[in-house]
Each structure stands twice: as C-alpha cells, then as structure tokens.
Image (cartoon, rainbow, N blue to C red):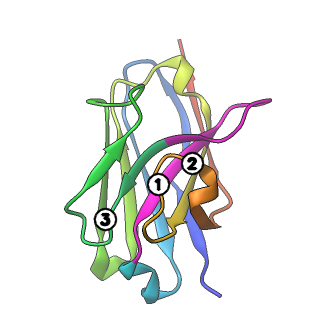
Amino acid sequence: QGQLVESGGGLVQAGDSLRLSCVASDPAFSVYGMGWFRHFPGKEREFVAGINFSGANTYYADAVKERFTISRDKAKNTVYLQMTSLKPEDTAVYYCARHIYSRDWNEARDYDYWGQGTQVTVSS
C-alpha cells in the first residue's frame, strides 16, 4: 500500500512562512486529489486545503484563504502547502491525505490514506 510522508513543520514566529511537503510512495497517488488537514488537541481534524488530481482546482478553508497555497508536483509525487503570515492559532499537527474521488473536500471521512503528520508551532 502507498504511504504519505509529511515534512517541513517546525517552530516559527508569527508572520513567518513555512512550506509543508507530502510525498507519496506510490506514483498511483498522482491520479487522486489530495488534501491537507490540521488537528488541534481535543478537536476533530479540520480541513485546510484540497487540490484535484490535475492541480487545476483548489479548495481552502476560510481561515487560511489568501494565506495558504496548495500545489502539487506530479513528477515528484509531492503535494505542498505553502503557509504565509502564520498566526499562533495555526499551531497544530498538519496531515496530508488522499481524497476519495467524487466526495466532498472538507470532511476527514472523504479521505482514505493519511500521513503521520508534521507539527507546526507558531509563537507570538
């Protein structure tokens, strides 16, 4: 089975930028849409951004619109989440996941394979 591995998290200050990467071990993942979620302690995973298989369509949560950008490089089997103007409330574990075709984009149940997550911490 394919795996998803996130990287790029870390500790930054408010206003800084980070780029998260999610590498798929199986090239077959390139025909799927992908998404990023984040998890705050004690809460359900929250949708952040999604991108369809071609990269032509992207979707964002209102909380991150105009600050975060999702993209993909099919040649590298990699999906990125460029995060700018980071805020302390963006502190969370960020996960990438494979989207189930034809499903909605903003619920965790609409994704099947998940990575292990990468911690993003934004200090004020």
**Where in the figure is residue 63, as x and y percent of width and height?**
42, 25
Structural crowding at the residue carrying mark 2, measured as other residues with C-alpha within 10 Å and reported as few (<14), some (14–19) or many (≥20)? some
Left or right: 31 in relation to 35: left
The location of residue 59, given as percent across then percent down, is 33, 46
Residue position marked by numbered label 1 in the rendering: 104
Q: Nearer the viewer, residue 12 or 81?
A: 81
Amino acid type for the residue under numbered disc 1: Asp
Q: Quadrant of residue 17?
A: top left
Q: Which segment is the magenta one?
A: 32-47
Of 17 and 47, which appears nearest the observer?
Answer: 47
Q: Which mark is residue 58?
A: none
Front disc: 1 or 3: 1
50 lies left or right of 4: left
Category of crowding for the residue at label 3, using alpha-carbon neighbours closer than 10 angstroms: few (below 14), some (14–19), many (at least 20): many
Separation of disc 3 and disc 2 at Cα? 20 Å
View extreme (top): residue: 124
- Judged from the image, the secondary structure of the residue bearing numbered disc 1 is loop
Q: Earlier in the sequence, mark 3 or mark 2?
A: 3
Which tag, 1 or 3, sits closer to the chain's start? 3
Q: Are marks 3 and 2 in contact (CB under 8 Å)?
A: no
Q: Which residue in the protein does label 2 denote? A: 107
State the residue position of label 3.
Answer: 72
Q: Is residue 96 above or below residue 73?
A: above
SS for dot 3: strand
Q: Identify which residue, 90 or 47, lies in the foreground.
A: 47
On screen, 92 above or below 20? above
**Residue at the location (59% across, 28% down)?**
91
Amino acid type shown at disc 2: Glu
Asked if marks 1 and 2 touch (Cβ < 8 Å), the reply is yes
Please tell me whether residue 20 belongs to the stretch shown in magenta.
no
